[in-house]
Amino acid sequence: MASGSIPVDIKDILNASSEASKAQSEAVKVDVYVDLSASEQLVSAVKQAFTPQAANAYLHIEAFDDSTVELPQISRDTDLVVIIAGTSITATRLANHAHNLKVPTLTVAMTLSDALANSTASGFPLVAADTIPFMQANETAEDAGEDFLPNVGQWIVDRCSAKRLAFANAFAFIRKPLALEITKNTSFQNGALGAVLFIPGADMPVMTANQIKMILQIAAAYGQKIGLERAKELAVVVGGGFAFRTIARELVALIPAYGWAVKAGVGYSGTFAMGRAAIEYFESGGTVAGVGEKVVSARNKVMEKAREAKSSYDEHRQERAKLSAASKQEKAESKQAKAESKQQAKQEKASKAQDAPKKGFTSPARRHAKRVVSEDAPRRFPLRGFPLHRDGKATDDPILVEPLEVTTVDREGGDQE
């Protein structure tokens, strides 16, 4: 593919843009029930957070307390129920009722321990996973509420995933948690693609398409209107020019045994950098018209770092190769020196053995021949293994041996008288 061409299917990108725009404009219905005994600080924070930012949100707010005889009517087509709990038993009854209707229900309270204790005492225990406190256990009054809205936003992203883009479009506090979720999911997806696709270049068009779709979804989460022309422009900017292919191939060639890990790392880190750049850009008030340049710039920085890492690794590998060659040469020289020393020692040993005088009698025949014969009377004794000649014939029979001259044998040298 020529430089500057787009390694993605434009039709696929336009379809993704259309789907994101449609999901963004879906209607969402939210019921907020306020316990009159709840903290004013908590009520104010929730009301402010659920002030609609777009026309696709329908908000219903209703108050209650323990004097309420009948529970408020909750419609089954409600997308989200939010209960601001105080000390009222009715709050926990209402939460259980909404759960029984299979409607996503979130209970918010000042502290988690007080809310759960109160609900247990009422006989209608709350679900801890569906209860979010305004103040964490380790927070002071001054720090209270810092993590409250991000936690509420993440809960809605997790529990209301079918309409998460519509919720983010309608309520600003949901946008960043959703954008981060989209970024993480797409980064993991591209990392997995790099790990499992072994055909060179086959994963690059898919990765690039995923990145473009990710930016489109993040833009939709921030309430940006995405027309077909904007989507095509984004595809040209993100998909054209410098892509992951070049640096990925260079790294894979450098470390072929771990090519899958390299491609996975490049796919994940590059995609994550693009998503974070888009989030920061939209958080600062940017529009979809300029997001392409921002995300490409972020990706290029990752690629530059990857190139620097490649260069550093290449130098390190060359240095290791030099050290390895020197070590092999040293071992070869040492081995040769040992062989020469061993050969020299062997030659010296052979030379000493040749020059040394022979000591004693090593032959059994010679030892028998030099036996000391007793001075006693003649007697018969066999000389086993040494046939004697009698009358010109060899015989092994014992024969009469006359007394011989006594000879003393010196085994270290010759005979002695």
Image (tube, helix red, strand yellow):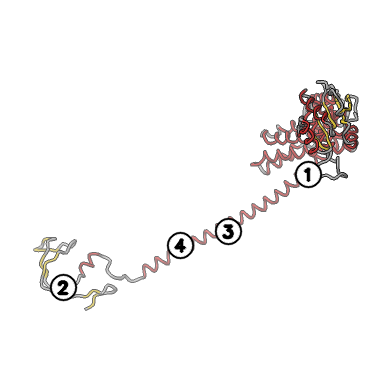
Residue position marked by numbered label 4 in the rendering: 343
The mark that comes first in sequence, 2 or 3, is: 3
Corner quadrant of residue 331: bottom right
- The type of residue carrying mark 3 is Glu
CB under 8 Å between callouts 2 and 3?
A: no
Question: What label does residue 304 carry, if any?
Answer: 1
Query: How far apart are the alpha carbons under marks 4 and 1?
Result: 58 Å
| Type of amino acid under label 2 | Ser
How far is mark 2 from mark 4, CA to CA? 52 Å
Q: Residue at x 78, y 42 (%)?
A: 302
Placement of the C terminus among the 4 image quadrants: bottom left
Position above or below: 62 against 145: above
Q: Which mark sits nearer the N-terminus, 4 or 3? A: 3
Q: Nearer the viewer, mark 4 or mark 1?
A: 1
- Mark 1–mark 3 CB contact (< 8 Å): no
**Pair 2/3: label in front:** 2
Identify the mark at residue 374; answer none if there is no mark.
2
Q: Are marks 2 and 4 in contact (CB under 8 Å)?
A: no
